[in-house]
Amino acid sequence: MIWLTWRQFRTQAVVAAAALAVLAVVLLITGLHVAHAYDTSQVPGCGAHHDCTSAAQNYVQSLKNNPLIFLTYYIGLVLVYLVPAIVGAFWGAPLVARELETGTLAMVWNQSVSRARWLATKLVVLGLSGMAAAGLLSWIMSWWIGPIARAGDYNRNGAGSGVNRFLPILFGAGGIAPIGYAAFAFALGVTAGVLMHRTLPALAVTLAVFAVVQVVMPNVIRPHLIPPVQATSSFNVSNLTELLIDGGPGSSGAPMTVLAAAEVPGAWLLSNVTITPSGKVFDGPAPQLCMTGTPQACNAWVGRQHLRQRITYQPASRYWDFQWIETAIFLVLGLALAGFSLWRVSRRRLA
Amino acid sequence: MTVALEARGLGKRYRRTWALTDCTLSVSAGKIVGLVGPNGAGKTTLLNMAVGMLTPTTGTIEVLGGRPDGSPAQLAKVGFVAQDTPTYRNLSVADHLRLGARLNQGWDDDLARNRVGRLGLELNKPAGKLSGGQRAQLALTIAIAKRPKILILDEPVASLDPLARREFLQHLMESVTEQDMSVVLSSHLVADLERVCDYMIVLVASRVRVAGDVENLLATHRRVTGARRDPADLPPDWEVVHASHTDRQTTMLVRTKTPITDTSWAVTEVGMEDIVLDYMSQATTGYKPALEVSS
């Protein structure tokens, strides 16, 4: 069975390996540049000699000015997300459905090998290959993005905590999570093919379901995998990143919101609100001073309001806990789907 | 004597329509069974249940005493060539033989290679580039070289031209005599089957109309022609398969075990093709279904 599996999978495997090799070379060359630029920038050891934020901004800006690096960054990220989807749609979905369409199942299922063994062998060989491809790409991309993610912690904008590897967009494209995604997507594709009997609809459903899962997971489920940490501290005006007033000069009682950057390097910031001493969310009203006076005077006024900053976040130290939990969730889902497909196929409920 | 194929009350329903109803059969081993019927009669459904590609809705089916449960032991006993003789397009002839060797303990590689050589199939050619006849031969080779005890072929010659048809059946018969196995093959054309089969099952509109040894069927069916008369006056052991009338005359295909001595009937022997065709047209004229006889 292993021979047949390999024989049928050979072309795809070679194409995938070649594509991965080309990609690895491109990432290696550009990645070395990213790392070298980091080492020679002012970011390492900043704080003592330079302002870290401006050092990080300079570093990231220098990378952005290089179109090759800029493109590789985005294409690389997209590809790490795409590989599991491709594995699911183009390896998983056709696995049973294509053979059902061409009628070859009727031939191969009538050799002296049980269907369970036939499918199990294919699931293992193709599934592990897909997981390996996703894991390899994720590993390379994690290395590639490492310096940017480190510098990103200083490169805050708005109320964010900086661009670090814990941010949803980078979290799913790094570490071991893509291995879990690949296992899940592959089993999802196989199951869709087993249930729908046709390759094209199964392929479409696989992509659609996987896309939905990739949106739901980071937005709805991942924040709660471990209860987030909540911290309240006094509002530091020197960290002020946002000051909005909904009104013009002359208006009285205009709503006003202020936000300060959160000082939690490497963390995944879930919320950041500014509250009054009584615990209510601060919403103004804005004094005339802030509409007519200088920004410095307004900031000084904000500093006198005894505001507090309340943040909820997942600390940086939990990064690998989250990686393991997320990977395990998707592996279990993948195994469950694979088990279902095996059961369905060997109970002859096909065709 | 072992039973090659045994069905009891077998039926299969797809959503609302029954593809096969109340099929009861018992065919002893060693026969070459022809399964004939018009397109959509349920032949493929019956054969697919025999090899376990489909699960019956009602009743049971056993092949060589075993349920088609997909177990390696049962699979090893049965060689199956599905409709349109599917093969892997991108895999070469040699790859197909290797597939057979890897997936069957009882694989007879010499037999497979001899057969492929005799047929003139190029080992390096992808199956997708073979002609329909060659592909059918390749599929048959794989089914035969696993050395099954029964060979089940679903419309193996349907897509072949008359010459390839004859060659295919000829090769099939050679292999069968060499290997001592039972064969079940289906076709919607009686002509394909009557030369090779010694047992015939006629399936029409999802029901078995008649089944029996060809010899027995030939011996018991007669075409009779005579003056038109009241059906109640016919001998009680006559079973009218099909009748057509003119104003004065009646022509019937009857089934009877006793010789026809009444000289007011002109009696002629009939060939298998005519018998089968009369059973098929019976379905449209609405006669009571004939009971099947097992031998």
Image: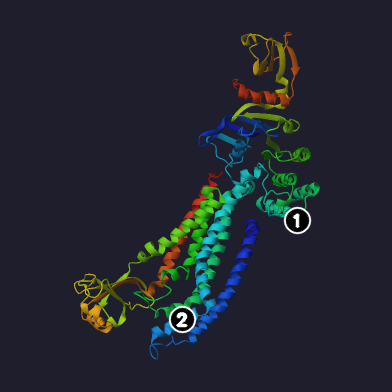
Give the secondary structure at mark 2.
Answer: helix
**What colouring does the structure picture have?**
rainbow
Q: Is residue B248 left or right of residue A203?
A: right
| Residue shown at the point (60%, 20%) measured from the top left | B287
Circle 1 Cα neighbour tier, 10 Å, few/some/many (<14 / 14–19 / ≥20): few
Q: How many marks?
A: 2
Location of residue A233 (image quadrant): bottom left
Location of residue B180 (image quadrant): top right
Q: Position of residue A170 (x, y in %)?
A: 45, 71
Give the secondary structure at mark 1.
Answer: loop
Q: Amino acid at mark 1?
A: Asn
Cα distance between the residues tagged 2 and 1: 58 Å
The answer to whether residue A117 shows anywhere in this view is: no
Q: Amino acid at mark 2?
A: Gln
The answer to whether residue A94 shows anywhere in this view is: yes
Quadrant of the image containing the C terminus of chain B: top right
In the rendered image, the vertical position of residue A324 relative to residue B252, given as above or below? below
Q: Position of residue B37 (x, y in %)?
A: 65, 31
Quadrant of the image containing the N terminus of chain B: top right
Q: Which residue is mark 1?
A: B124
Q: Position of residue B184 (x, y in %)?
A: 68, 36
Q: Position of residue A265 (x, y in %)?
A: 37, 78
Disc assigned to residue B208: none
Q: Chain of mark 2?
A: A
Pair 2/1: label in front: 2
The extreme front residue here reads: A250
| Residue shown at the point (46%, 67%) measured from the top left | A177
In the rendered image, the vertical position of residue B5 relative to residue A179, given as above or below? above
Foreground residue among A47 and B50? A47
Q: Chain of mark 1?
A: B
In the rendered image, the vertical position of residue A204 relative to residue A147, given as above or below? above
Q: Which residue is mark 2?
A: A61
